[in-house]
Image: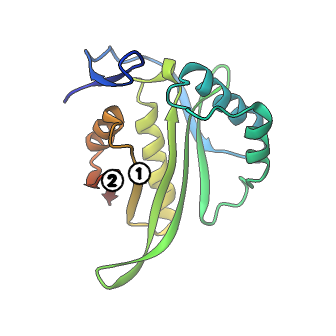
């Protein structure tokens, strides 16, 4: 399977030699309202480390205002999962998810949506993204979801390969699904 890294000079993903897996101890859990400050710090660090991905840089105040509007305790159709380091309890990965009703094969069913999945660059290649997906599948099952959808940029070769490796099917440009 090819491996891709972002090359800022070329402004695109390029094939690269796969780095060795990192050994990082993390745990996963649903984010709580008390985690908002850690999540804001995570977003600020994402922007600092990879400004080429976060094209429209937001200020701390803007990110804080966004997260103040989100109630992380309400989990009937929306949830955010965080990956935290065991020692420092630092957020190093995040996945936001929800669901909606849709008509598949003449049957109304719940469809899960992953709206955000990101792992801090220094913590990649440690299985954190896969761990976030696996944790999300447990929650999707509790919600009665049988299909997950997500959008991935067509130029995001690293993301496309990551989702293919996890058995997602690329349905059309930018849309990947997983039936389970």
Horizontal and vertical percent position of residue 94: 56, 39
- Whether pointer 1 and pointer 2 mark residues with C-beta atoms closer than 8 Å, the reply is yes
Q: Residue furthest left?
A: 1
Identified at 53% across, 25% down, the residue is: 120
Identified at 77% across, 34% down, the residue is: 37
Q: Which residue corresponds to mark 2? A: 176
- Classify residue 95 by image quadrant: top right
Which mark is drawn over residue 107? Answer: none
- Classify residue 81 by image quadrant: top right
The quadrant of the image that shows the N terminus is top left
Let me know if residue 31 appears in the view: yes
Q: Nearer the viewer, residue 117 or 151?
A: 151
Report the side of 53 relative to 65 (left or right): left
Q: Earlier in the sequence, mark 1 or mark 2?
A: 1
**Disc 1: CA contacts within 10 A as few (<14), some (14-19) or many (>=20):** some
Horizontal and vertical percent position of residue 101: 48, 75
Horizontal and vertical percent position of residue 33: 77, 47
Q: Residue furthest bottom?
A: 106
């Amino acid at each position: 399977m090819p491996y891709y890294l972002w090359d800022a000079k070329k402004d695109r993903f390029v094939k690269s030699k796969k780095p060795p897996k990192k050994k990082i101890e993390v745990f996963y859990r649903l984010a709580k309202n008390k985690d908002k400050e850690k999540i804001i710090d995570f977003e600020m660090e994402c922007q600092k480390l990879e400004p080429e991905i976060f094209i429209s840089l937001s200020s701390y105040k803007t990110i804080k205002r966004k997260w103040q509007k989100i109630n992380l305790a309400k989990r009937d159709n929306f949830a955010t999962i965080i990956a935290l380091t065991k020692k420092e309890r630092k957020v190093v990965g995040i996945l936001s998810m929800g669901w909606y009703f849709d008509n598949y094969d003449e049957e109304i069913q719940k469809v899960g949506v992953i709206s955000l999945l990101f792992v801090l660059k220094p913590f990649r290649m440690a299985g954190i993204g896969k761990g976030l997906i696996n944790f999300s599948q447990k929650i999707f099952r509790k919600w009665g979801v049988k299909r997950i959808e997500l959008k991935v940029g067509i130029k995001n070769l690293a993301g496309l390969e990551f989702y293919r490796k996890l058995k997602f099917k690329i349905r059309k440009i930018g849309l990947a699904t997983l039936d389970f």
